[in-house]
Image: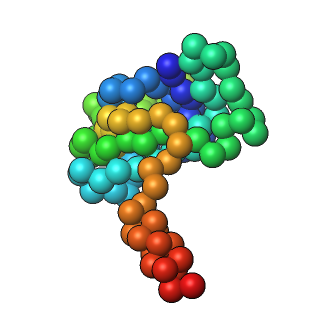
């Protein structure tokens, strides 16, 4: 089973247990993040569109970091114009823990049970 999800105008193909680098997220190490699913493929076939609106890819943040430095060199011939600049793109490394329905929160189920007893 694999899924394709979108984050930061990019799409990623993942299976459970995969480690991947996505654009920097404002999450701490050990936090759980969820991404909306674009496509899911399994033994039953491929699902897209309305069939996957409720599905999420759940990931755990493993680390934050910066990519290897790249050199951006701008040059105009015969004009004595040269500009050398470096860049390191920040990233967040995540591990895919689950593909499917989002995890239900225990607090909301307890609250619903308390309201049902009150009635």
Q: Is residue 88 visible?
A: no
Colour setup of the view: rainbow
The residue depicted at 66 percent of the width and 37 percent of the height is 52
Vertical placement of 106 versus 39: above or below?
below
The residue depicted at 25 percent of the width and 41 percent of the height is 62
The residue depicted at 41 percent of the width and 50 percent of the height is 33
The residue depicted at 49 percent of the width and 80 percent of the height is 117
Closer-to-camera residue (102/85):
102
Vertical placement of 32 versus 4: above or below?
below
Q: Picture coordinates of residue 44 (x, y %)?
A: 63, 16
* 119 horizontally vs 109: left or right: right
* 10 horizontally vs 89: left or right: right
Residue farthest to the right?
A: 50
Quadrant containing the C terminus is bottom right
Closer-to-camera residue (8/68):
8
* 26 horizontally vs 55: left or right: left
Q: How many marks?
A: 0
Q: Picture coordinates of residue 80 (x, y %)?
A: 47, 34
Q: Quadrant of residue 42?
A: top right
Q: Is residue 34 visible?
A: yes
Q: Picture coordinates of residue 76 (x, y %)?
A: 54, 30
Q: Quadrant of residue 4?
A: top right
């Amino acid at each position: 089973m694999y899924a394709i999800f979108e984050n930061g105008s990019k799409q990623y193909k993942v299976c459970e247990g995969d480690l991947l680098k996505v654009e920097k997220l404002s999450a701490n190490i050990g936090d759980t993040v969820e991404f909306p699913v674009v496509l899911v493929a399994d033994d039953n076939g491929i699902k897209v569109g309305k069939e996957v609106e409720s599905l999420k890819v759940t990931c755990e943040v493993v680390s934050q970091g910066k990519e290897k430095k790249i050199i951006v060199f701008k040059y105009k011939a015969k004009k004595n114009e040269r500009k050398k600049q470096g860049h390191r793109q920040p990233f967040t490394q995540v591990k895919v823990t689950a593909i499917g329905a989002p995890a239900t929160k225990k607090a909301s189920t307890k609250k619903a049970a308390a309201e049902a007893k009150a009635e």
